């Protein structure tokens, strides 16, 4: 699939990453590349297995905002990037692991929660250089799990929807509108056109109960963590706009909407 994807027109790297189950991997002999979830930001929420994959790597690749959470744990070469130079960083990473270095890619939270675009791109970059090198996902603690803990919304009674992706969100919004009748919601907003206020307004327009409790969980596990508590009707007052200045919340938020129990 190398070189075929474009976030606006697909095929989506997330679909590639989810295309087949992970193969059987012998970590001793197969020297996999690891795709590690580093947790929500505070190192106390990084698993020992993820930490070891970071500590023992020769080269670590990831977004600058993710790598900086773990850079003090390793002597690895750090290939940091943003959206614009992501492809270059991943290409360099693929070349280095194909040349025999041990490689770890780091993702925020847990890669299995709204993280497969990155996993797919890592897998593609590695396979492009050497199709024999497998990629193993090491899960992390997701911001969703943190938000569920703060909001006390057990996963079995909760609908999780990510809006944190490019393209058409109609099916995801429909799922929210249906679920809000009888299930808790955990939502990853999209900066900055589907922020918590916009989602609250959409839910009200689709018949949600205005008195439902809505928690905007910001900077979870960081020193400046804040849980903003509203009714859905109060939160909808923050709807509107598509820019950073149009919302009181940062882009590091999870929205939880609670059903009464
Ligand atoms: C592309 S998604 C990836 C989610 C990630 N894989 C996870 O499991 O948390 C990035 C979004 O996750 C949410 N997020 C990640 N870390 C967070 C934190 N510490 N506090 C609140 N929200 C967070 C924000 O909505 C952010 O825009």
Image: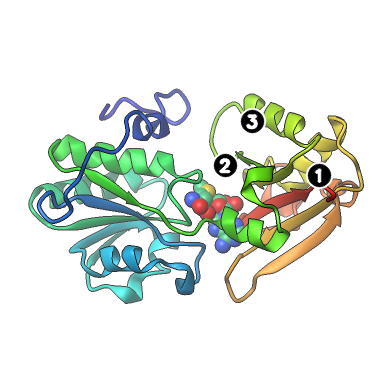
Instruction: Give the x, y percent position of residue 184.
Output: 73, 45
Using residue 141 as the reference point, say whether residue 124 is left or right of it: left
**Of labels 2 and 1, the one closer to you:** 2
Q: Separation of disc 2 and disc 1 at Cα?
A: 17 Å
Check disc 1 and report the residue beneath it.
239
Check disc 2 and report the residue beneath it.
164
**Of labels 1 and 3, the one closer to you:** 3
Check disc 3 and report the residue beneath it.
172
Where is residue 37, by image quadrant? bottom left
Judge the density around disc 2: few (<14), some (14-19), many (≥20) Cα neighbours within 10 Å: some
Q: Residue at x 28, y 50 (%)?
A: 89
Q: Earlier in the sequence, mark 1 or mark 3?
A: 3
**Kind of element beneath mark 3:** helix
Q: Quadrant of the N terminus?
A: top left
Q: Is mark 2 within 8 Å of ligand 1?
A: yes
Q: Residue at x 85, y 56 (%)?
A: 230
Q: Residue at x 61, y 65 (%)?
A: 220
Asked if marks 2 and 3 touch (Cβ < 8 Å), the reply is: no
Instruction: Give the x, y percent position of residue 252.
Output: 60, 57
């Amino acid at each position: 699939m190398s070189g075929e994807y474009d976030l606006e027109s697909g095929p989506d790297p997330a679909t590639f990453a989810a295309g087949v189950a992970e193969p059987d991997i012998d970590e001793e002999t197969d020297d996999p590349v690891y795709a590690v979830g580093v947790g929500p930001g505070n190192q106390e929420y990084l698993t020992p297995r993820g930490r070891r994959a970071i500590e023992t790597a020769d080269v670590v690749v990831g977004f600058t905002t993710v790598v900086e959470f773990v850079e003090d744990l390793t002597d690895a070469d750090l290939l940091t990037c943003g959206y614009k130079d992501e492809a270059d960083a991943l290409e360099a990473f693929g070349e280095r692991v194909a040349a025999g270095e041990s490689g770890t890619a780091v993702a925020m939270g847990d890669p299995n929660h709204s993280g497969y675009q990155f996993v797919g791109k890592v897998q593609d970059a590695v396979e492009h250089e050497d199709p024999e090198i497998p990629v193993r996902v090491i899960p992390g603690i997701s911001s969703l799990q943190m938000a569920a803990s703060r909001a006390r919304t057990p996963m079995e009674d909760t609908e999780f929807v990510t809006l944190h992706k490019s393209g058409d969100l109609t099916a995801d919004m429909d799922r929210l509108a249906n679920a809000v009748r009888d299930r808790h919601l955990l939502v990853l907003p999209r900066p900055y056109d589907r922020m918590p206020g916009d989602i609250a307004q959409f839910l009200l327009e689709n018949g949600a109960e205005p008195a439902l409790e809505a928690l905007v969980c910001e900077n979870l596990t960081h020193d400046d963590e804040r849980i903003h508590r509203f009714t859905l009707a109060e939160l909808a007052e923050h709807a509107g706009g598509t820019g950073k200045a149009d919302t009181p919340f940062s882009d590091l938020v999870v929205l939880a909407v609670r059903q009464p129990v």
